[in-house]
Amino acid sequence: MNLFNVYPLFNINPVKAQGSFLWDENGQQYLDFYGGHAVISIGHNHPHYVERLKNQLEKISFYSNSVENKIQQELAEKLGLLSGYEDYSLFLCNSGAEANENALKLASFHNGKKKVVYFSEAFHGRTSAAVAVTDNTKIVAPVNESENFIKCEFNNSEELEKIFAENQNEISAVIVEGIQGVGGINLLTEDFILKIEKLCKENNSILILDEVQSGYGRSGKFFAHQEFDIKPDLITVAKGMGNGFPIGGVLISPKFEASYGLLGTTFGGNHLACVAGLAVLEVIEKENLIQNSEKIGAYIEEKIKHFPHIKNIKRRGLMIGIELDQACADVRKALLFEHFIFTGNANDKNVLRILPALNISEKESDLFINALEKTLKSIDAKKEIIEFK
Ligand SMILES: Cc1ncc(COP(=O)(O)O)c(C=O)c1O
């Protein structure tokens, strides 16, 4: 049997990883400035994470959600404490899409309504309702399509007001990313997020904050939306939550009432996943990684902002979009194949997406900074050679 060929792959097979470095099967070292799509929050194979998981493996890895698992409660308490959402409750699942799927369901169960507003350039996952609120027609199958999902331009308050006015009392939820990741590191304006919250409150609609990519300290706050004076009804998390172990969750405001069977999953909240989640939070807290995220993010921005071909830097903490004056594909390839540094791309072809581990150091960042400078300068050098010829 072959693999279903859905990923265009770089010809690199990492076999070992430590901190912010990876090694391929030939022993070539790579600097990880992408964290495997914002997943690696505390660095690869952090010793505390490895020890916690090894210990748990020797005890019990899994049993069903029909019996108690006290590690789930421990994880919920720690997450509540570190995120500032102690009065919320937690539903555990396995991925970001699943977290959003459950959040959209919860909203609809709660207010009995069907319509959902989402934004241009949004990405919320690839499953049923999650993909329907994702702004990419290429990944929405006919089975996912429905008139219940209404697209609004990102950061356009007037359009949002119009949508609410035209769909009086029918909007179940508005779903928005803390910072748009896949779209190209697009930041919410304060006016817009305040408007979303206000309209949701006035219309008995639920505000869902997707913090799958922007959460867990990446933005320099526990959640990116905490830059603003708002309180979402539901917050979804995954990616950095498990540092590579599949885990996701929905943080649920006290206004929602749980009932048996309302939500459920086989694997969600299993022993290993919860221990991975706890280890991540313990490291984030002990090593002050939220502060480090802003400190190193600002350091990188300061060092690169005058480099040629950089048009704009969109950044919170270590969620960085470097917007070039041209498509970034060749720069990304040069970083990977000439300097052995992983970076990411975005829907916006000009944006280089940078999402390193939150414990990356200045010294490690310098490797990226120097390589980026050389790569960007070489664009002009190559152009001069071509013009000269
Ligand atoms: C903001 C956001 N939400 C949801 C998802 C989907 O997460 P997953 O791939 O774990 O289903 C992603 C993945 O990139 C994401 O960036």
Image (tube, rainbow, N blue to C red):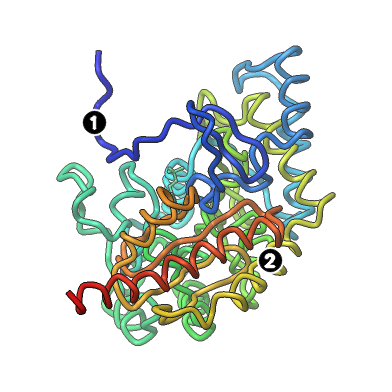
Q: Is mark 2 within 8 Å of ligand 1?
A: no
Q: Is residue 254 visible?
A: no
Q: Residue 326's spot in the image, x, y percent?
A: 30, 74
**Where is the C terminus found, in terms of image quarters?**
bottom left
The residue mark sitting in front, 1 or 2, is 2
Residue 13: quadrant of the picture: top left
Mark 1 in CB contact with mark 2 (< 8 angstroms): no
Rate crowding at label 1 as few (under 14), some (14 to 19) or many (20 or more) other CA atoms within 10 Å. Answer: few
- At mark 2, the secondary structure is helix
Examine the rendered structure and indicate whether residue 243 appears above or below residue 2.
below
Q: Is mark 1 within 8 Å of ligand 1?
A: no
Type of amino acid under label 1: Asn
**Where is the N terminus found, in terms of image quarters?**
top left
Examine the rendered structure and indicate whether residue 124 appears above or below residue 70.
below
Type of amino acid under label 2: Ile
Q: Earlier in the sequence, mark 1 or mark 2?
A: 1
User: Which residue corresponds to the image point at 37% horizontal and 64% vertical from the top-left?
Assistant: 183
Residue 278: quadrant of the picture: top right
Count of labels in the image = 2
Q: Which residue is mark 1?
A: 5
Residue 53: quadrant of the picture: top right
User: Which residue corresponds to the image point at 59% horizontal and 69% vertical from the top-left?
Assistant: 225
Q: Which mark is residue 179?
A: none
In front of the other: 15 or 358? 15
Q: Which residue is mark 2?
A: 296
Q: Residue furthest front?
A: 389
Would you say 259 lies left or right of 334 here? right
User: Which residue corresponds to the image point at 34% horizontal and 65% vertical from the top-left?
Assistant: 328
- At mark 1, the secondary structure is loop
Q: Residue 41's spot in the image, x, y percent?
A: 63, 48
Q: Is residue 123 visible?
A: yes
In front of the other: 83 or 30? 30
